[in-house]
Amino acid sequence: MKPFVASALAGFACVLSPLAIAQATVPAPTSPQVIVAPDAALPPLPRKVLVPFRATYSVARNGSPAGVASMQVVDLGGGRWRLDLGIRGTQGLAGLAGLNLQQSTVFERVGDTFRPLSQATIKNLLLRSQRITGSYDWSRNSAQWTGDVSSKRRAPVALQPGDMNTLLVNLAVVRDADAGKPLQYRVVDNGRARLQAFITSAAKETITVGDLSYDAWHVSRTNAGSDGMDAWVSDNVPTPVRIVQKDGDTGTLELLLTDYKGPAK
């Protein structure tokens, strides 16, 4: 599993809708929402404050349109939240293959950390389906995965304070990015634990999407080996405005934010 956009079949990342199937006990959001365009003239959603939102992205692979993606955060109440991320192939090979990938993580905020409690992944491609679930038992400091996961990844993994899973890194970089700031997270996911290191650009870069433009911090992973992972974070948007994942085997996947919804005022 990789940060920002979780690794998936054919080099694509996950979600379009909440994972109600995989985490059926999690209630759907009921509070009304309004569209908040990412424009400085409209009410912003400060990135360092965890708020409910739903974002929509266009998706390209190796520069060609491939589909649509969405990311959302839902306030479940009682200090618990849910983060959903996914992608649906609508064009090119992704559309022909019927790509539909979904991920969901239930987590709680403990101080300044996002602590995962459970996660679920569903991948559908070319009439094949894969389901993986993970649980984080903080009373025993242990995490474990079941379902369509390899035998070597089924053993429990020891947890440490501050551990996150891959999906939560999306929220962490939005919260933490600052001029020239190095970032490091211990990510426990899919049966293993790894340190992921990033660096933030010294100055903001301009990201243009259609008629919209953002001044954004560029966050790059520095220990990804042959793979490259980048995100651009704007101060008035609660989710990355651009995500690029480069993989030597599957090419480049790019997500560009097209709009998002925030909580109703």
Image (cartoon, helix red, strand yellow):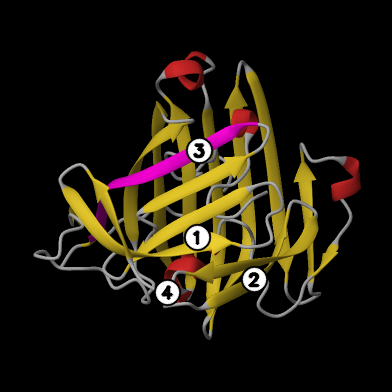
- How far apart in space, not on screen, are marks 3 and 2 (Cα)? 22 Å
Q: Secondary structure at mark 3?
A: strand
| Residues at circles 3 and 1 in contact by the CB criterion of under 8 Å | no
Image check: 197 left or right of 67?
right
**Disc 3 marks which amino acid?**
Leu
Earlier sequence position, callout 2 versus callout 4: 2
Front position in the image: 203 or 113: 203
Q: Are marks 2 and 4 in contact (CB under 8 Å)?
A: no
Residue under label 4 = 202
Report the amino acid beneath label 2: Tyr
Q: Residues within 10 Å of mark 1 (few under 14, many from 20)?
A: many
From the viewer's perspective, is residue 64 above or below residue 246? above
Give the residue at x 45% y 45%: 18
Q: Which residues are magenta?
A: 250-262
Q: Secondary structure at mark 4?
A: loop
Q: Is residue 160 left or right of residue 213?
A: right
Judged left or right of residue 139, residue 232 is left
Disc 2: which residue: 185
Question: Where's residue 4, x and y in %?
Answer: 53, 54
Q: Nearer the viewer, residue 110 or 30?
A: 110
- How many residues crowd around disc 4 within 10 Å: few (fewer than 14), some, or many (20 or more)? few
Residue under label 1, please give it.
170
Location of residue 97 with respect to 70 vertically, above or below: above
Mark with earlier residue (2, 1): 1
| Residue at the image point whose x is 49% and y is 13% from the top | 96
Residue at the disc numbered 3: 253
Residue beneath the point at 51% across and 44% down = 19
